[in-house]
Image: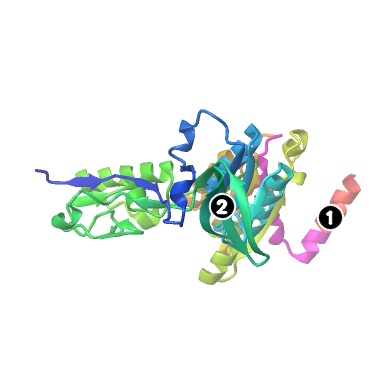
Amino acid sequence: KFRKAVIASGASPFVPPIEGIDQVNVLTNETIFNLTELPKKLIVVGGGPIGMEIAQSFARLGSEVTVIEKGVQILGRSDRQASEVLADQLRKEGLDLRLETSLTKFSTENGVSIAHIESESGKKEIETDAVLMSIGRKPNITGMGLDKAGVKTDPHEGVLIDDFFRSTNKNVFAAGDVASSYQFTHAADAMARAVIVNAFYFGRARHSKLIIPWSTYTSPEIAGVGLTLEEAEKQFDHVKQIEIPFTEVDRAILDCETNGFMKVVYGKKGKILGATIVSEHAGNMIGEVVMAMQHNITLGDISAIVHPYPTQGEALKKAGDAYKRTLLSPGTAGILKWIMRRGK
C-alpha cells in the first residue's frame, strides 16, 4: 500500500523483427560490452548518438565498421552542418556510412552472416561478424499491472504524464526513460528531482520548463540545447544565428582542434533560443549555454562576462561580442573599424 508512487523502470533497446535476425550475432548497447573478442566486421544499424559513439569506438579498436541509416544524415535530429562534420571525420577513419539505405533481411551462407541492404543504387550484400542494433529504445511498461492502477501508457511514449509528471492516476508519478523522449541519464535525474518536490513538498515543477542539453560523445563531440535555427523560425519572429568557427578560437588552434564550430540561435534582445557545438569538448561547453537559457542571460550579457584566455569556452563570449556588433549603427561601426586599423 502507498500514498504516492513513482514509475522509473527505464527503457530497453528495440530490436525489430527483421527476417533472419536469429541467424546473426545481434548486439545492443547493453550487451556489446560483454564481448570478449573484437568482431572483424561490425554492422551498426541506426545512425543515432549511441550507434555513432560505438561505431567510431570499434573502428578505432580495429573493426571494419559499416553503418546503415535510413535517413539522409547521421544524427538525424542534429544540425545538418554538425552531422556533416562528424560524417566526414568518420569516413576519414575508414567507416563505411550507407545513408538512405534499408536493411531488408539477414541470411547465412557457409557459416558466414550476411546483411541484405537496399538503396537507390540497388541491392547489396555485406558480410558481418556481429550486428549492433541502435535504432531506438522502448519504454519498460509491461508486467506491472499499470492498467489496473489506472495508469495509461503508450507503446512508444511509455507512461503518459502531465506537465507535473503525474500519470493518469494522480498519485502515481513517472520519471526517466519510461516517460520521456529525452533518453539521457541527466534528464532522468532532473525529472526524478522534480517528482520528489511535487510528490512530497507540494511543488509545481513542470516538465515543460526543463531545459535539457544533449551530447554525443564521438570525436569531435556534438552537443546541443534548445532549438535549431529552422525550428526557431517556425515559432518566433526576428530569429537570427551567430556562428563561431573554432578556426577563430586561439585555444582550439593551439590544441589543433579547429574541426568544429559553435552556433547560437537568438531572438529579440539577444535572448538565446538554442545552440549547437561541434568540438572535442562540446559536452563540457554546452553547460554555460544551458545556464544562460535557464536564467534568461542574453548574448549581450555574455559579452560582458570575463572569460579566461585562452580557452575553447571563449567561443561563447565571441558569439556575445558578435551579437553586440550587430547593434552598432553603420556609422559607429565604420568609426570603430577605422580606430582598429589605426591601432594596427
As measured in the structure, the alpha-carbon distance from the residue carrying label 1 to the one carrying label 2 is 60 Å
- Magenta span of residues: 310-334
Q: Would you say residue 312 sits in the magenta stretch?
A: yes
In-image side of 284 versus 6 (left or right): right
Disc 1 secondary structure class: helix
Q: Is residue 189 visible?
A: yes
Disc 2 secondary structure class: strand
Q: How many marks?
A: 2
Q: Position of residue 280 (x, y in %)?
A: 65, 39
Q: Residue at x 22, y 49 (%)?
A: 143
Q: Position of residue 89 (x, y in %)?
A: 70, 45
> In which quadrant is the N terminus drawn?
top left
Crowd rating for badge 1 (residues with CA inside 10 Å; few <14, some 14–19, many 20+): few
Q: Which residue is drawn at 46% across and 31% down?
A: 34
- State the mark number for residue 115: 2
Residue type at mark 2: give it.
Ala
